[in-house]
Image (cartoon, helix red, strand yellow):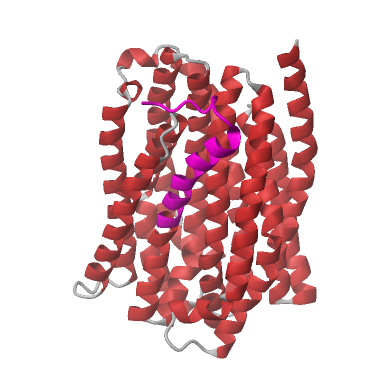
Amino acid sequence: MAKDLTKGRPFPVLLQFTLPVIGGNLFQLFYTLADTVIVGRTLGAQALAAVGSTTIIIYFVLCFIQGFTGGFGICLGQRFGAQDTHGMRRSVAVSWGLSLVFTVAVTALTCGLTHQILYWMQTPDSIYQDAYDYMFVVLLGTGATVFYNMISNMLRALGDSRTPLVFLVFSALLNVVLDVVFIVPLQMGVAGAAWATVVSQFLSAALCTVVGMKKFEVLRTSRSDLAGWQKAAWQHLRIGFPMGFQMSVMCIGQLAMQAAVNALGPVAIAGYTAATKVDQLSVLMNNAFGIALSNFVAQCYGAGLYGRIREGVRASLIQTEAGNLFMCVLLLACRNAVTPFFIDNPTAETIQYANGYLLAVAPFYVILGLLLVFRTAVQSMGNSRAPFAACLVELVMRIGGTFGLSRVLGYTGICLSSPLAWAGATSLLIPVYVSEIRHHAMKENR
């Protein structure tokens, strides 16, 4: 049964929807953490550095997929809020078709450019082959990532945030088992960790789809649901592509950050990798609140409940910033345990690099929360232009900060470029949100 987010008090409705998403995101992070811990402890620091040097490229592709499919989820959520059954079925059919085309194009492009990308990233020769093996296999499995994220976003658009969690938990546990099997007895090296992730995610997506289709009749589409697909496809792409760009623009800037860190050598890469892995706890928590708010706003927008959107954004801000404060305190208090968690007997220099990143970034999580909430609210109301512009600002400030601040502050300057980018994008989005909500509130009161 689809859950109607247009009813009930916004604060508990959002929190109830968010908690399973946070669980799902944590288990999604568990995929990469399992790879990192098992690789670091069984294959050593060099192998960890190889995996770490490719992480931002893989994360870039993942972020684009999450945004791209998340945009399709907004379209479905708006049709659900408007109680348009035919529109919902057409949205599902168009989403699957566009996702298939996208998967083929992205897989061919990224796998074909793997060597060139590693060269651009200044990957050290000592870890180059392992980095290539890991990155190529993960990118070859892009279809599994698209598959899982598409069905998850569809279910969440229909108000179901629990089913994706159940199968992601299963997948995460399977991933750990396959990591050990592929790396230790089968001796597949870092490529084994990559294959474990791909296989696990594909099985999770397949099982999630089977259960989803049993629960929601609207997901069982036919050829007739593609009637008028051209207009629907354009609407989905108009929201999906900007959201994909918005989700991945952080990664585009982080490519510059990773390249700058790569130039410092394997020790810096290992410390930076360990810190950014735990930093993803905060990013994924923020994304979970954003997913909940996105579906809430999309359904309320489709139903024309603009005042409820304002109440939901206020509730989401309270929840998101409370979570950010908790994560900031947790990571700073436990920062000395981060590097030893990934590497046996790490050097003092490696620990210093990891701690330096967390000390520079964690205190500014509150700005990341503001950025995510206001960007999500604006784009879920159908405005893709302002978030796109904000992402351009974020990109320019992140790259500029990386190369500008690093000349003055060194490694610390590289780390501080992220908070600088968040602040720049947020300063643009807050006025846009205020203008949008006032405009829609006036229409509601007429």
Rendered location of residue 341, percent (x, y): 45, 78
Q: Which residues are magenta?
A: 1-27
Residue 352, relative to residue 289: is it above or below?
A: below
Residue 194, relative to residue 144: is it above or below?
A: below
Left or right: where 341 falls relative to 234: left
- Quadrant in the picture for the C terminus: top right
Residue 101, relative to residue 20: is it above or below?
A: above
Q: Is residue 126 visible?
A: no
* Residue at the image position 49 percent from the left and 31 percent from the top: 72
Q: Magenta includes 3?
A: yes
278 vs 6, nearest the viewer: 6
> How many numbered circles does the render carry?
0
Q: Is residue 139 visible?
A: yes
Q: Magenta includes 338?
A: no
Left or right: where 407 falls relative to 225: right
* Residue at the image position 67 percent from the left and 53 percent from the top: 368
* Residue at the image position 72 percent from the left and 35 percent from the top: 386
Left or right: where 10 falls relative to 168: right
- Quadrant in the picture for the N terminus: top left
For the stretch drawn in magenta, the main secondary structure is helix
Rendered location of residue 142, percent (x, y): 38, 48
Rendered location of residue 366, percent (x, y): 69, 56
119 vs 419, nearest the viewer: 419
Q: Which quarter of the picture shows residue 217?
A: top left
126 vs 336, nearest the viewer: 336
403 vs 196, nearest the viewer: 196
Q: Residue furthest left?
A: 185
Rendered location of residue 130, percent (x, y): 38, 72
